[in-house]
Image (tube, helix red, strand yellow):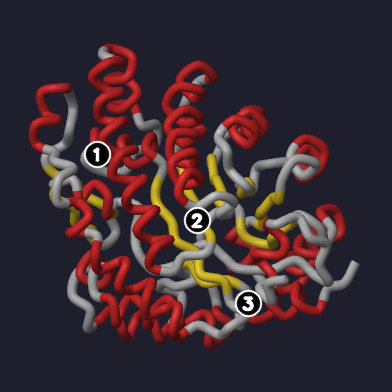
Amino acid sequence: MSNKLLLRVLSGESVERPPIWLMRQAGRYLPEYRAVRARGGSFLDLCYSPELAAEVTLQPIRRYGFDASIVFSDILVVADALGQSVRFEESVGPLLAPPVRQRTDLTLLKAEGAAERLQPVYETLKLLRRALPSETCLIGFAGAPWTVASYMVAGEGSRDQAAARLWAYRDPTGFSELIDLIVQVTIEYLLGQVRAGAEVLQIFDSWAGSLPEGEFQRWCIEPTKVITSAIHREFPGLPIIGFPKGAGAMYPDYALKTGITAVSLDSSMPLQFAKDRLQPHMTVQGNLDPLLLVSGGKALLQEAGRILSLMGNRRFIFNLGHGIVPETPPENVTELVQFVKNWRS
C-alpha cells in the first residue's frame, strides 16, 4: 500500500482525511517565487530551466507540506514545441505568433522535434522525484487540445474563444487537423512526464465551458479520450485527473466518457450534484473559490468546512475551483492547509 495519500484516494481507498494540493500553488503570491522569477529571465525561460523550475515547484511543499506537488510549467509549452512563438507579457498574458487561423497555417507547425524542445520539463521532473519528501506525490500535466488550440488560433487568451469556435464551425476538417496535431504531441509529452517520474497526470481544459453540447463532445471529450487511452496503453492504471472548467451539466458526460480517473470541479459546480452524479463513479477534486483564499478568516474556513463535510473522506481531493491568484496572502494558505489536515469526518 502506498504511503502517498493522493494515490490512495485516487485508487478509491477510504482515508483518514482528504489530501490537499492547490492549482498554481507555486507562483507569484509567494515572495520566494518572486525572488527566483526575478533572476529566471522570461517566464518560458523559467519553465525550461530545470533547476529553477524544480526550486519553485518545491517552494510550496517546504512552506505548506502539501500532499502533492505539480511540476512548474505551462500548458502553452506544447504550442511552443510545435513551433509557434510563445511569450508572456506582464498584465497582458500569453501572446502566440503568428496565430494559426486556417488549414494552410498548419504548415507553420511541426510535431518533429517537439520532444526535444520539451526535454527540460522531463529534467525538472527527474530532479523533483529525487528532492520531494517520500510521502509527496508528483503530478505532471498538460493543457487539453481544445484549450491549447484556442490560444493558438486567437494568438492570445480570449473571453469566448470565438476565433477557434468559428474555424471549427466553418472548416471542422481543417480544425480537426490542428486538434490531432496537438493530441499527438500531448500524448508524447505526457508519456515523457510519466517516464521522468510523474505519478499522476492532470489535463487542464480551461475553456471547455465555451462549447455547446455537440462541439463539447467533439473537441473536448473525444480528444481527451484519445490521450487517456494512449497513456493507459503504456501505463495501465496511471491516475489521470481531468479538469473541464465551466462544463456545467456536461461534467458527467466528460467524466464518464473520457477515461479519466478523477475529475476536478470548478467553483461553480454544485457539490450536491457532484456528490450524486460524479463521486459514485470516481474521485472528485475541488472546488473552493480562489478568492476565499484572498479573503481568509471565517468565510474561508466556513466554506472549507462545508466542502469537507459534504464530500467526506473517500474519493475526494481538496483543491480550488481554479488556480491561486497572485494577491493571495501566504498566511491564508497556511490556515487552510492546517484546517484540512486537522479535519476528521
In space, the residues marked 1 and 2 are separated at their CA atoms by: 23 Å
Among numbered discs 3 and 2, the one appearing first in the sequence: 2
Which quarter of the rendering shows the N terminus?
Answer: bottom right
- Residue 177, located in which quarter of the rendered image? top left
Q: Is residue 201 left or right of residue 153?
A: right
Residue at 63% across / 28% down in the picture?
Answer: 253
Q: Which mark is residue 152?
A: 1
Question: Is residue 324 visible to the viewer in this orientation of the structure?
Answer: no
Residue 314 percent across, percent down from the top left:
81, 58
Residue indicated by mark 2: 201
Residue at 58% across / 43% down in the picture?
Answer: 260
Above or below 322: residue 24: below
Looking at the rendered image, the disc whose residue lies closer to the viewer, 1 or 2, is 2
Q: Is residue 168 left or right of residue 245?
A: left
Above or below 190: residue 19: below
Q: Which residue type carries mark 2?
A: Leu
In space, the residues marked 1 and 3 are separated at their CA atoms by: 35 Å
